[in-house]
Structure formats: C-alpha cells, structure tokens
Amino acid sequence: MDYAARRSGGGLLEGLYRVIMRRNSVYVTFIIAGAFAGERAVDYGVHKLWEYNNVGKRYYDISVLGQRQSEE
C-alpha cells in the first residue's frame, strides 16, 4: 500500500483529528469542554463509590443519631 492510497482513505480518528485540529479555537474549546465533562464524570463516580462503601455509616442512615431522650 503506497502513501497516496493510505492518505486518501483516512479513518475515523484521522477525520476527527482533522476537524478538531484545523483551528486553534476549536481545539481549545474541545479541551475545555472535555476537561469539564471529565471532571463531572469523575466527581459523580467518586461520589457514588463513596456512598456505596459507606451505606449504613452515614449520618442520615442512623435513626437515633441526634435525638435526645426527653427528661420527664
């Protein structure tokens, strides 16, 4: 397979690379949006993992916590 035949076909990743890297503004927007989406995904995942590992140990899981006996 020669270089010209490979270059003309391209692939999905090469096409995506060309679209994103064509202009600096598109590249910067892609990076910022990706960082924001990645941060949200990691935050959600860590929160769910923490809740899963602490079921029954959380403040609102304990029914008597914070309730005082009434003095009679």
Image (cartoon, grey):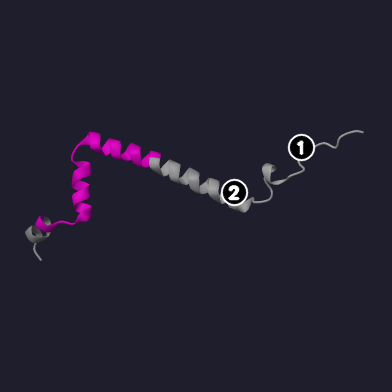
Chain part drawn in magenta: 8-36
| First reached walking from the N terminus: tag 1 or tag 2 | 2
Find the distance from the CA under tag 1 to the CA under tag 2. 21 Å
**49 or 71, which lies in front?**
71
Of the two numbered discs 1 and 2 in the rendering, the one whose residue sits closer to the viewer: 1
Looking at the image, residue 13 lies above or below residue 60: below
Tell me: 62 left or right of 15: right
> Looking at the picture, how far across and down is residue 63, in whole percent?
74, 44
Q: What quarter of the picture does the N terminus occupy?
A: bottom left
The 10 Å Cα crowd at callout 1, few under 14, some 14 to 19, many 20 or more, is few
Residue type at numbered disc 2 = Glu
- Residue at which label 1 appears: 66
Instruction: Please name the residue shown 54% across and 45% down the image.
Output: 47
> Looking at the picture, how far across and down is residue 71, in whole percent?
90, 33
> Looking at the picture, how far across and down is residue 40, in whole percent?
44, 41
Q: What quarter of the picture does the C terminus occupy?
A: top right
> Looking at the picture, how far across and down is residue 32, in whole percent?
34, 37
**16 or 54, which lies in front?**
54
Residue type at numbered disc 1 = Gly
Q: Residue furthest right?
A: 72
Q: Residue furthest front?
A: 72
Label number found at residue 51: 2
Tell me: 21 left or right of 37: left
Q: Circle 2 — which element?
A: helix
The 10 Å Cα crowd at callout 2, few under 14, some 14 to 19, many 20 or more, is few
Q: Circle 1 — which element?
A: loop
Q: Quadrant of residue 19?
A: top left
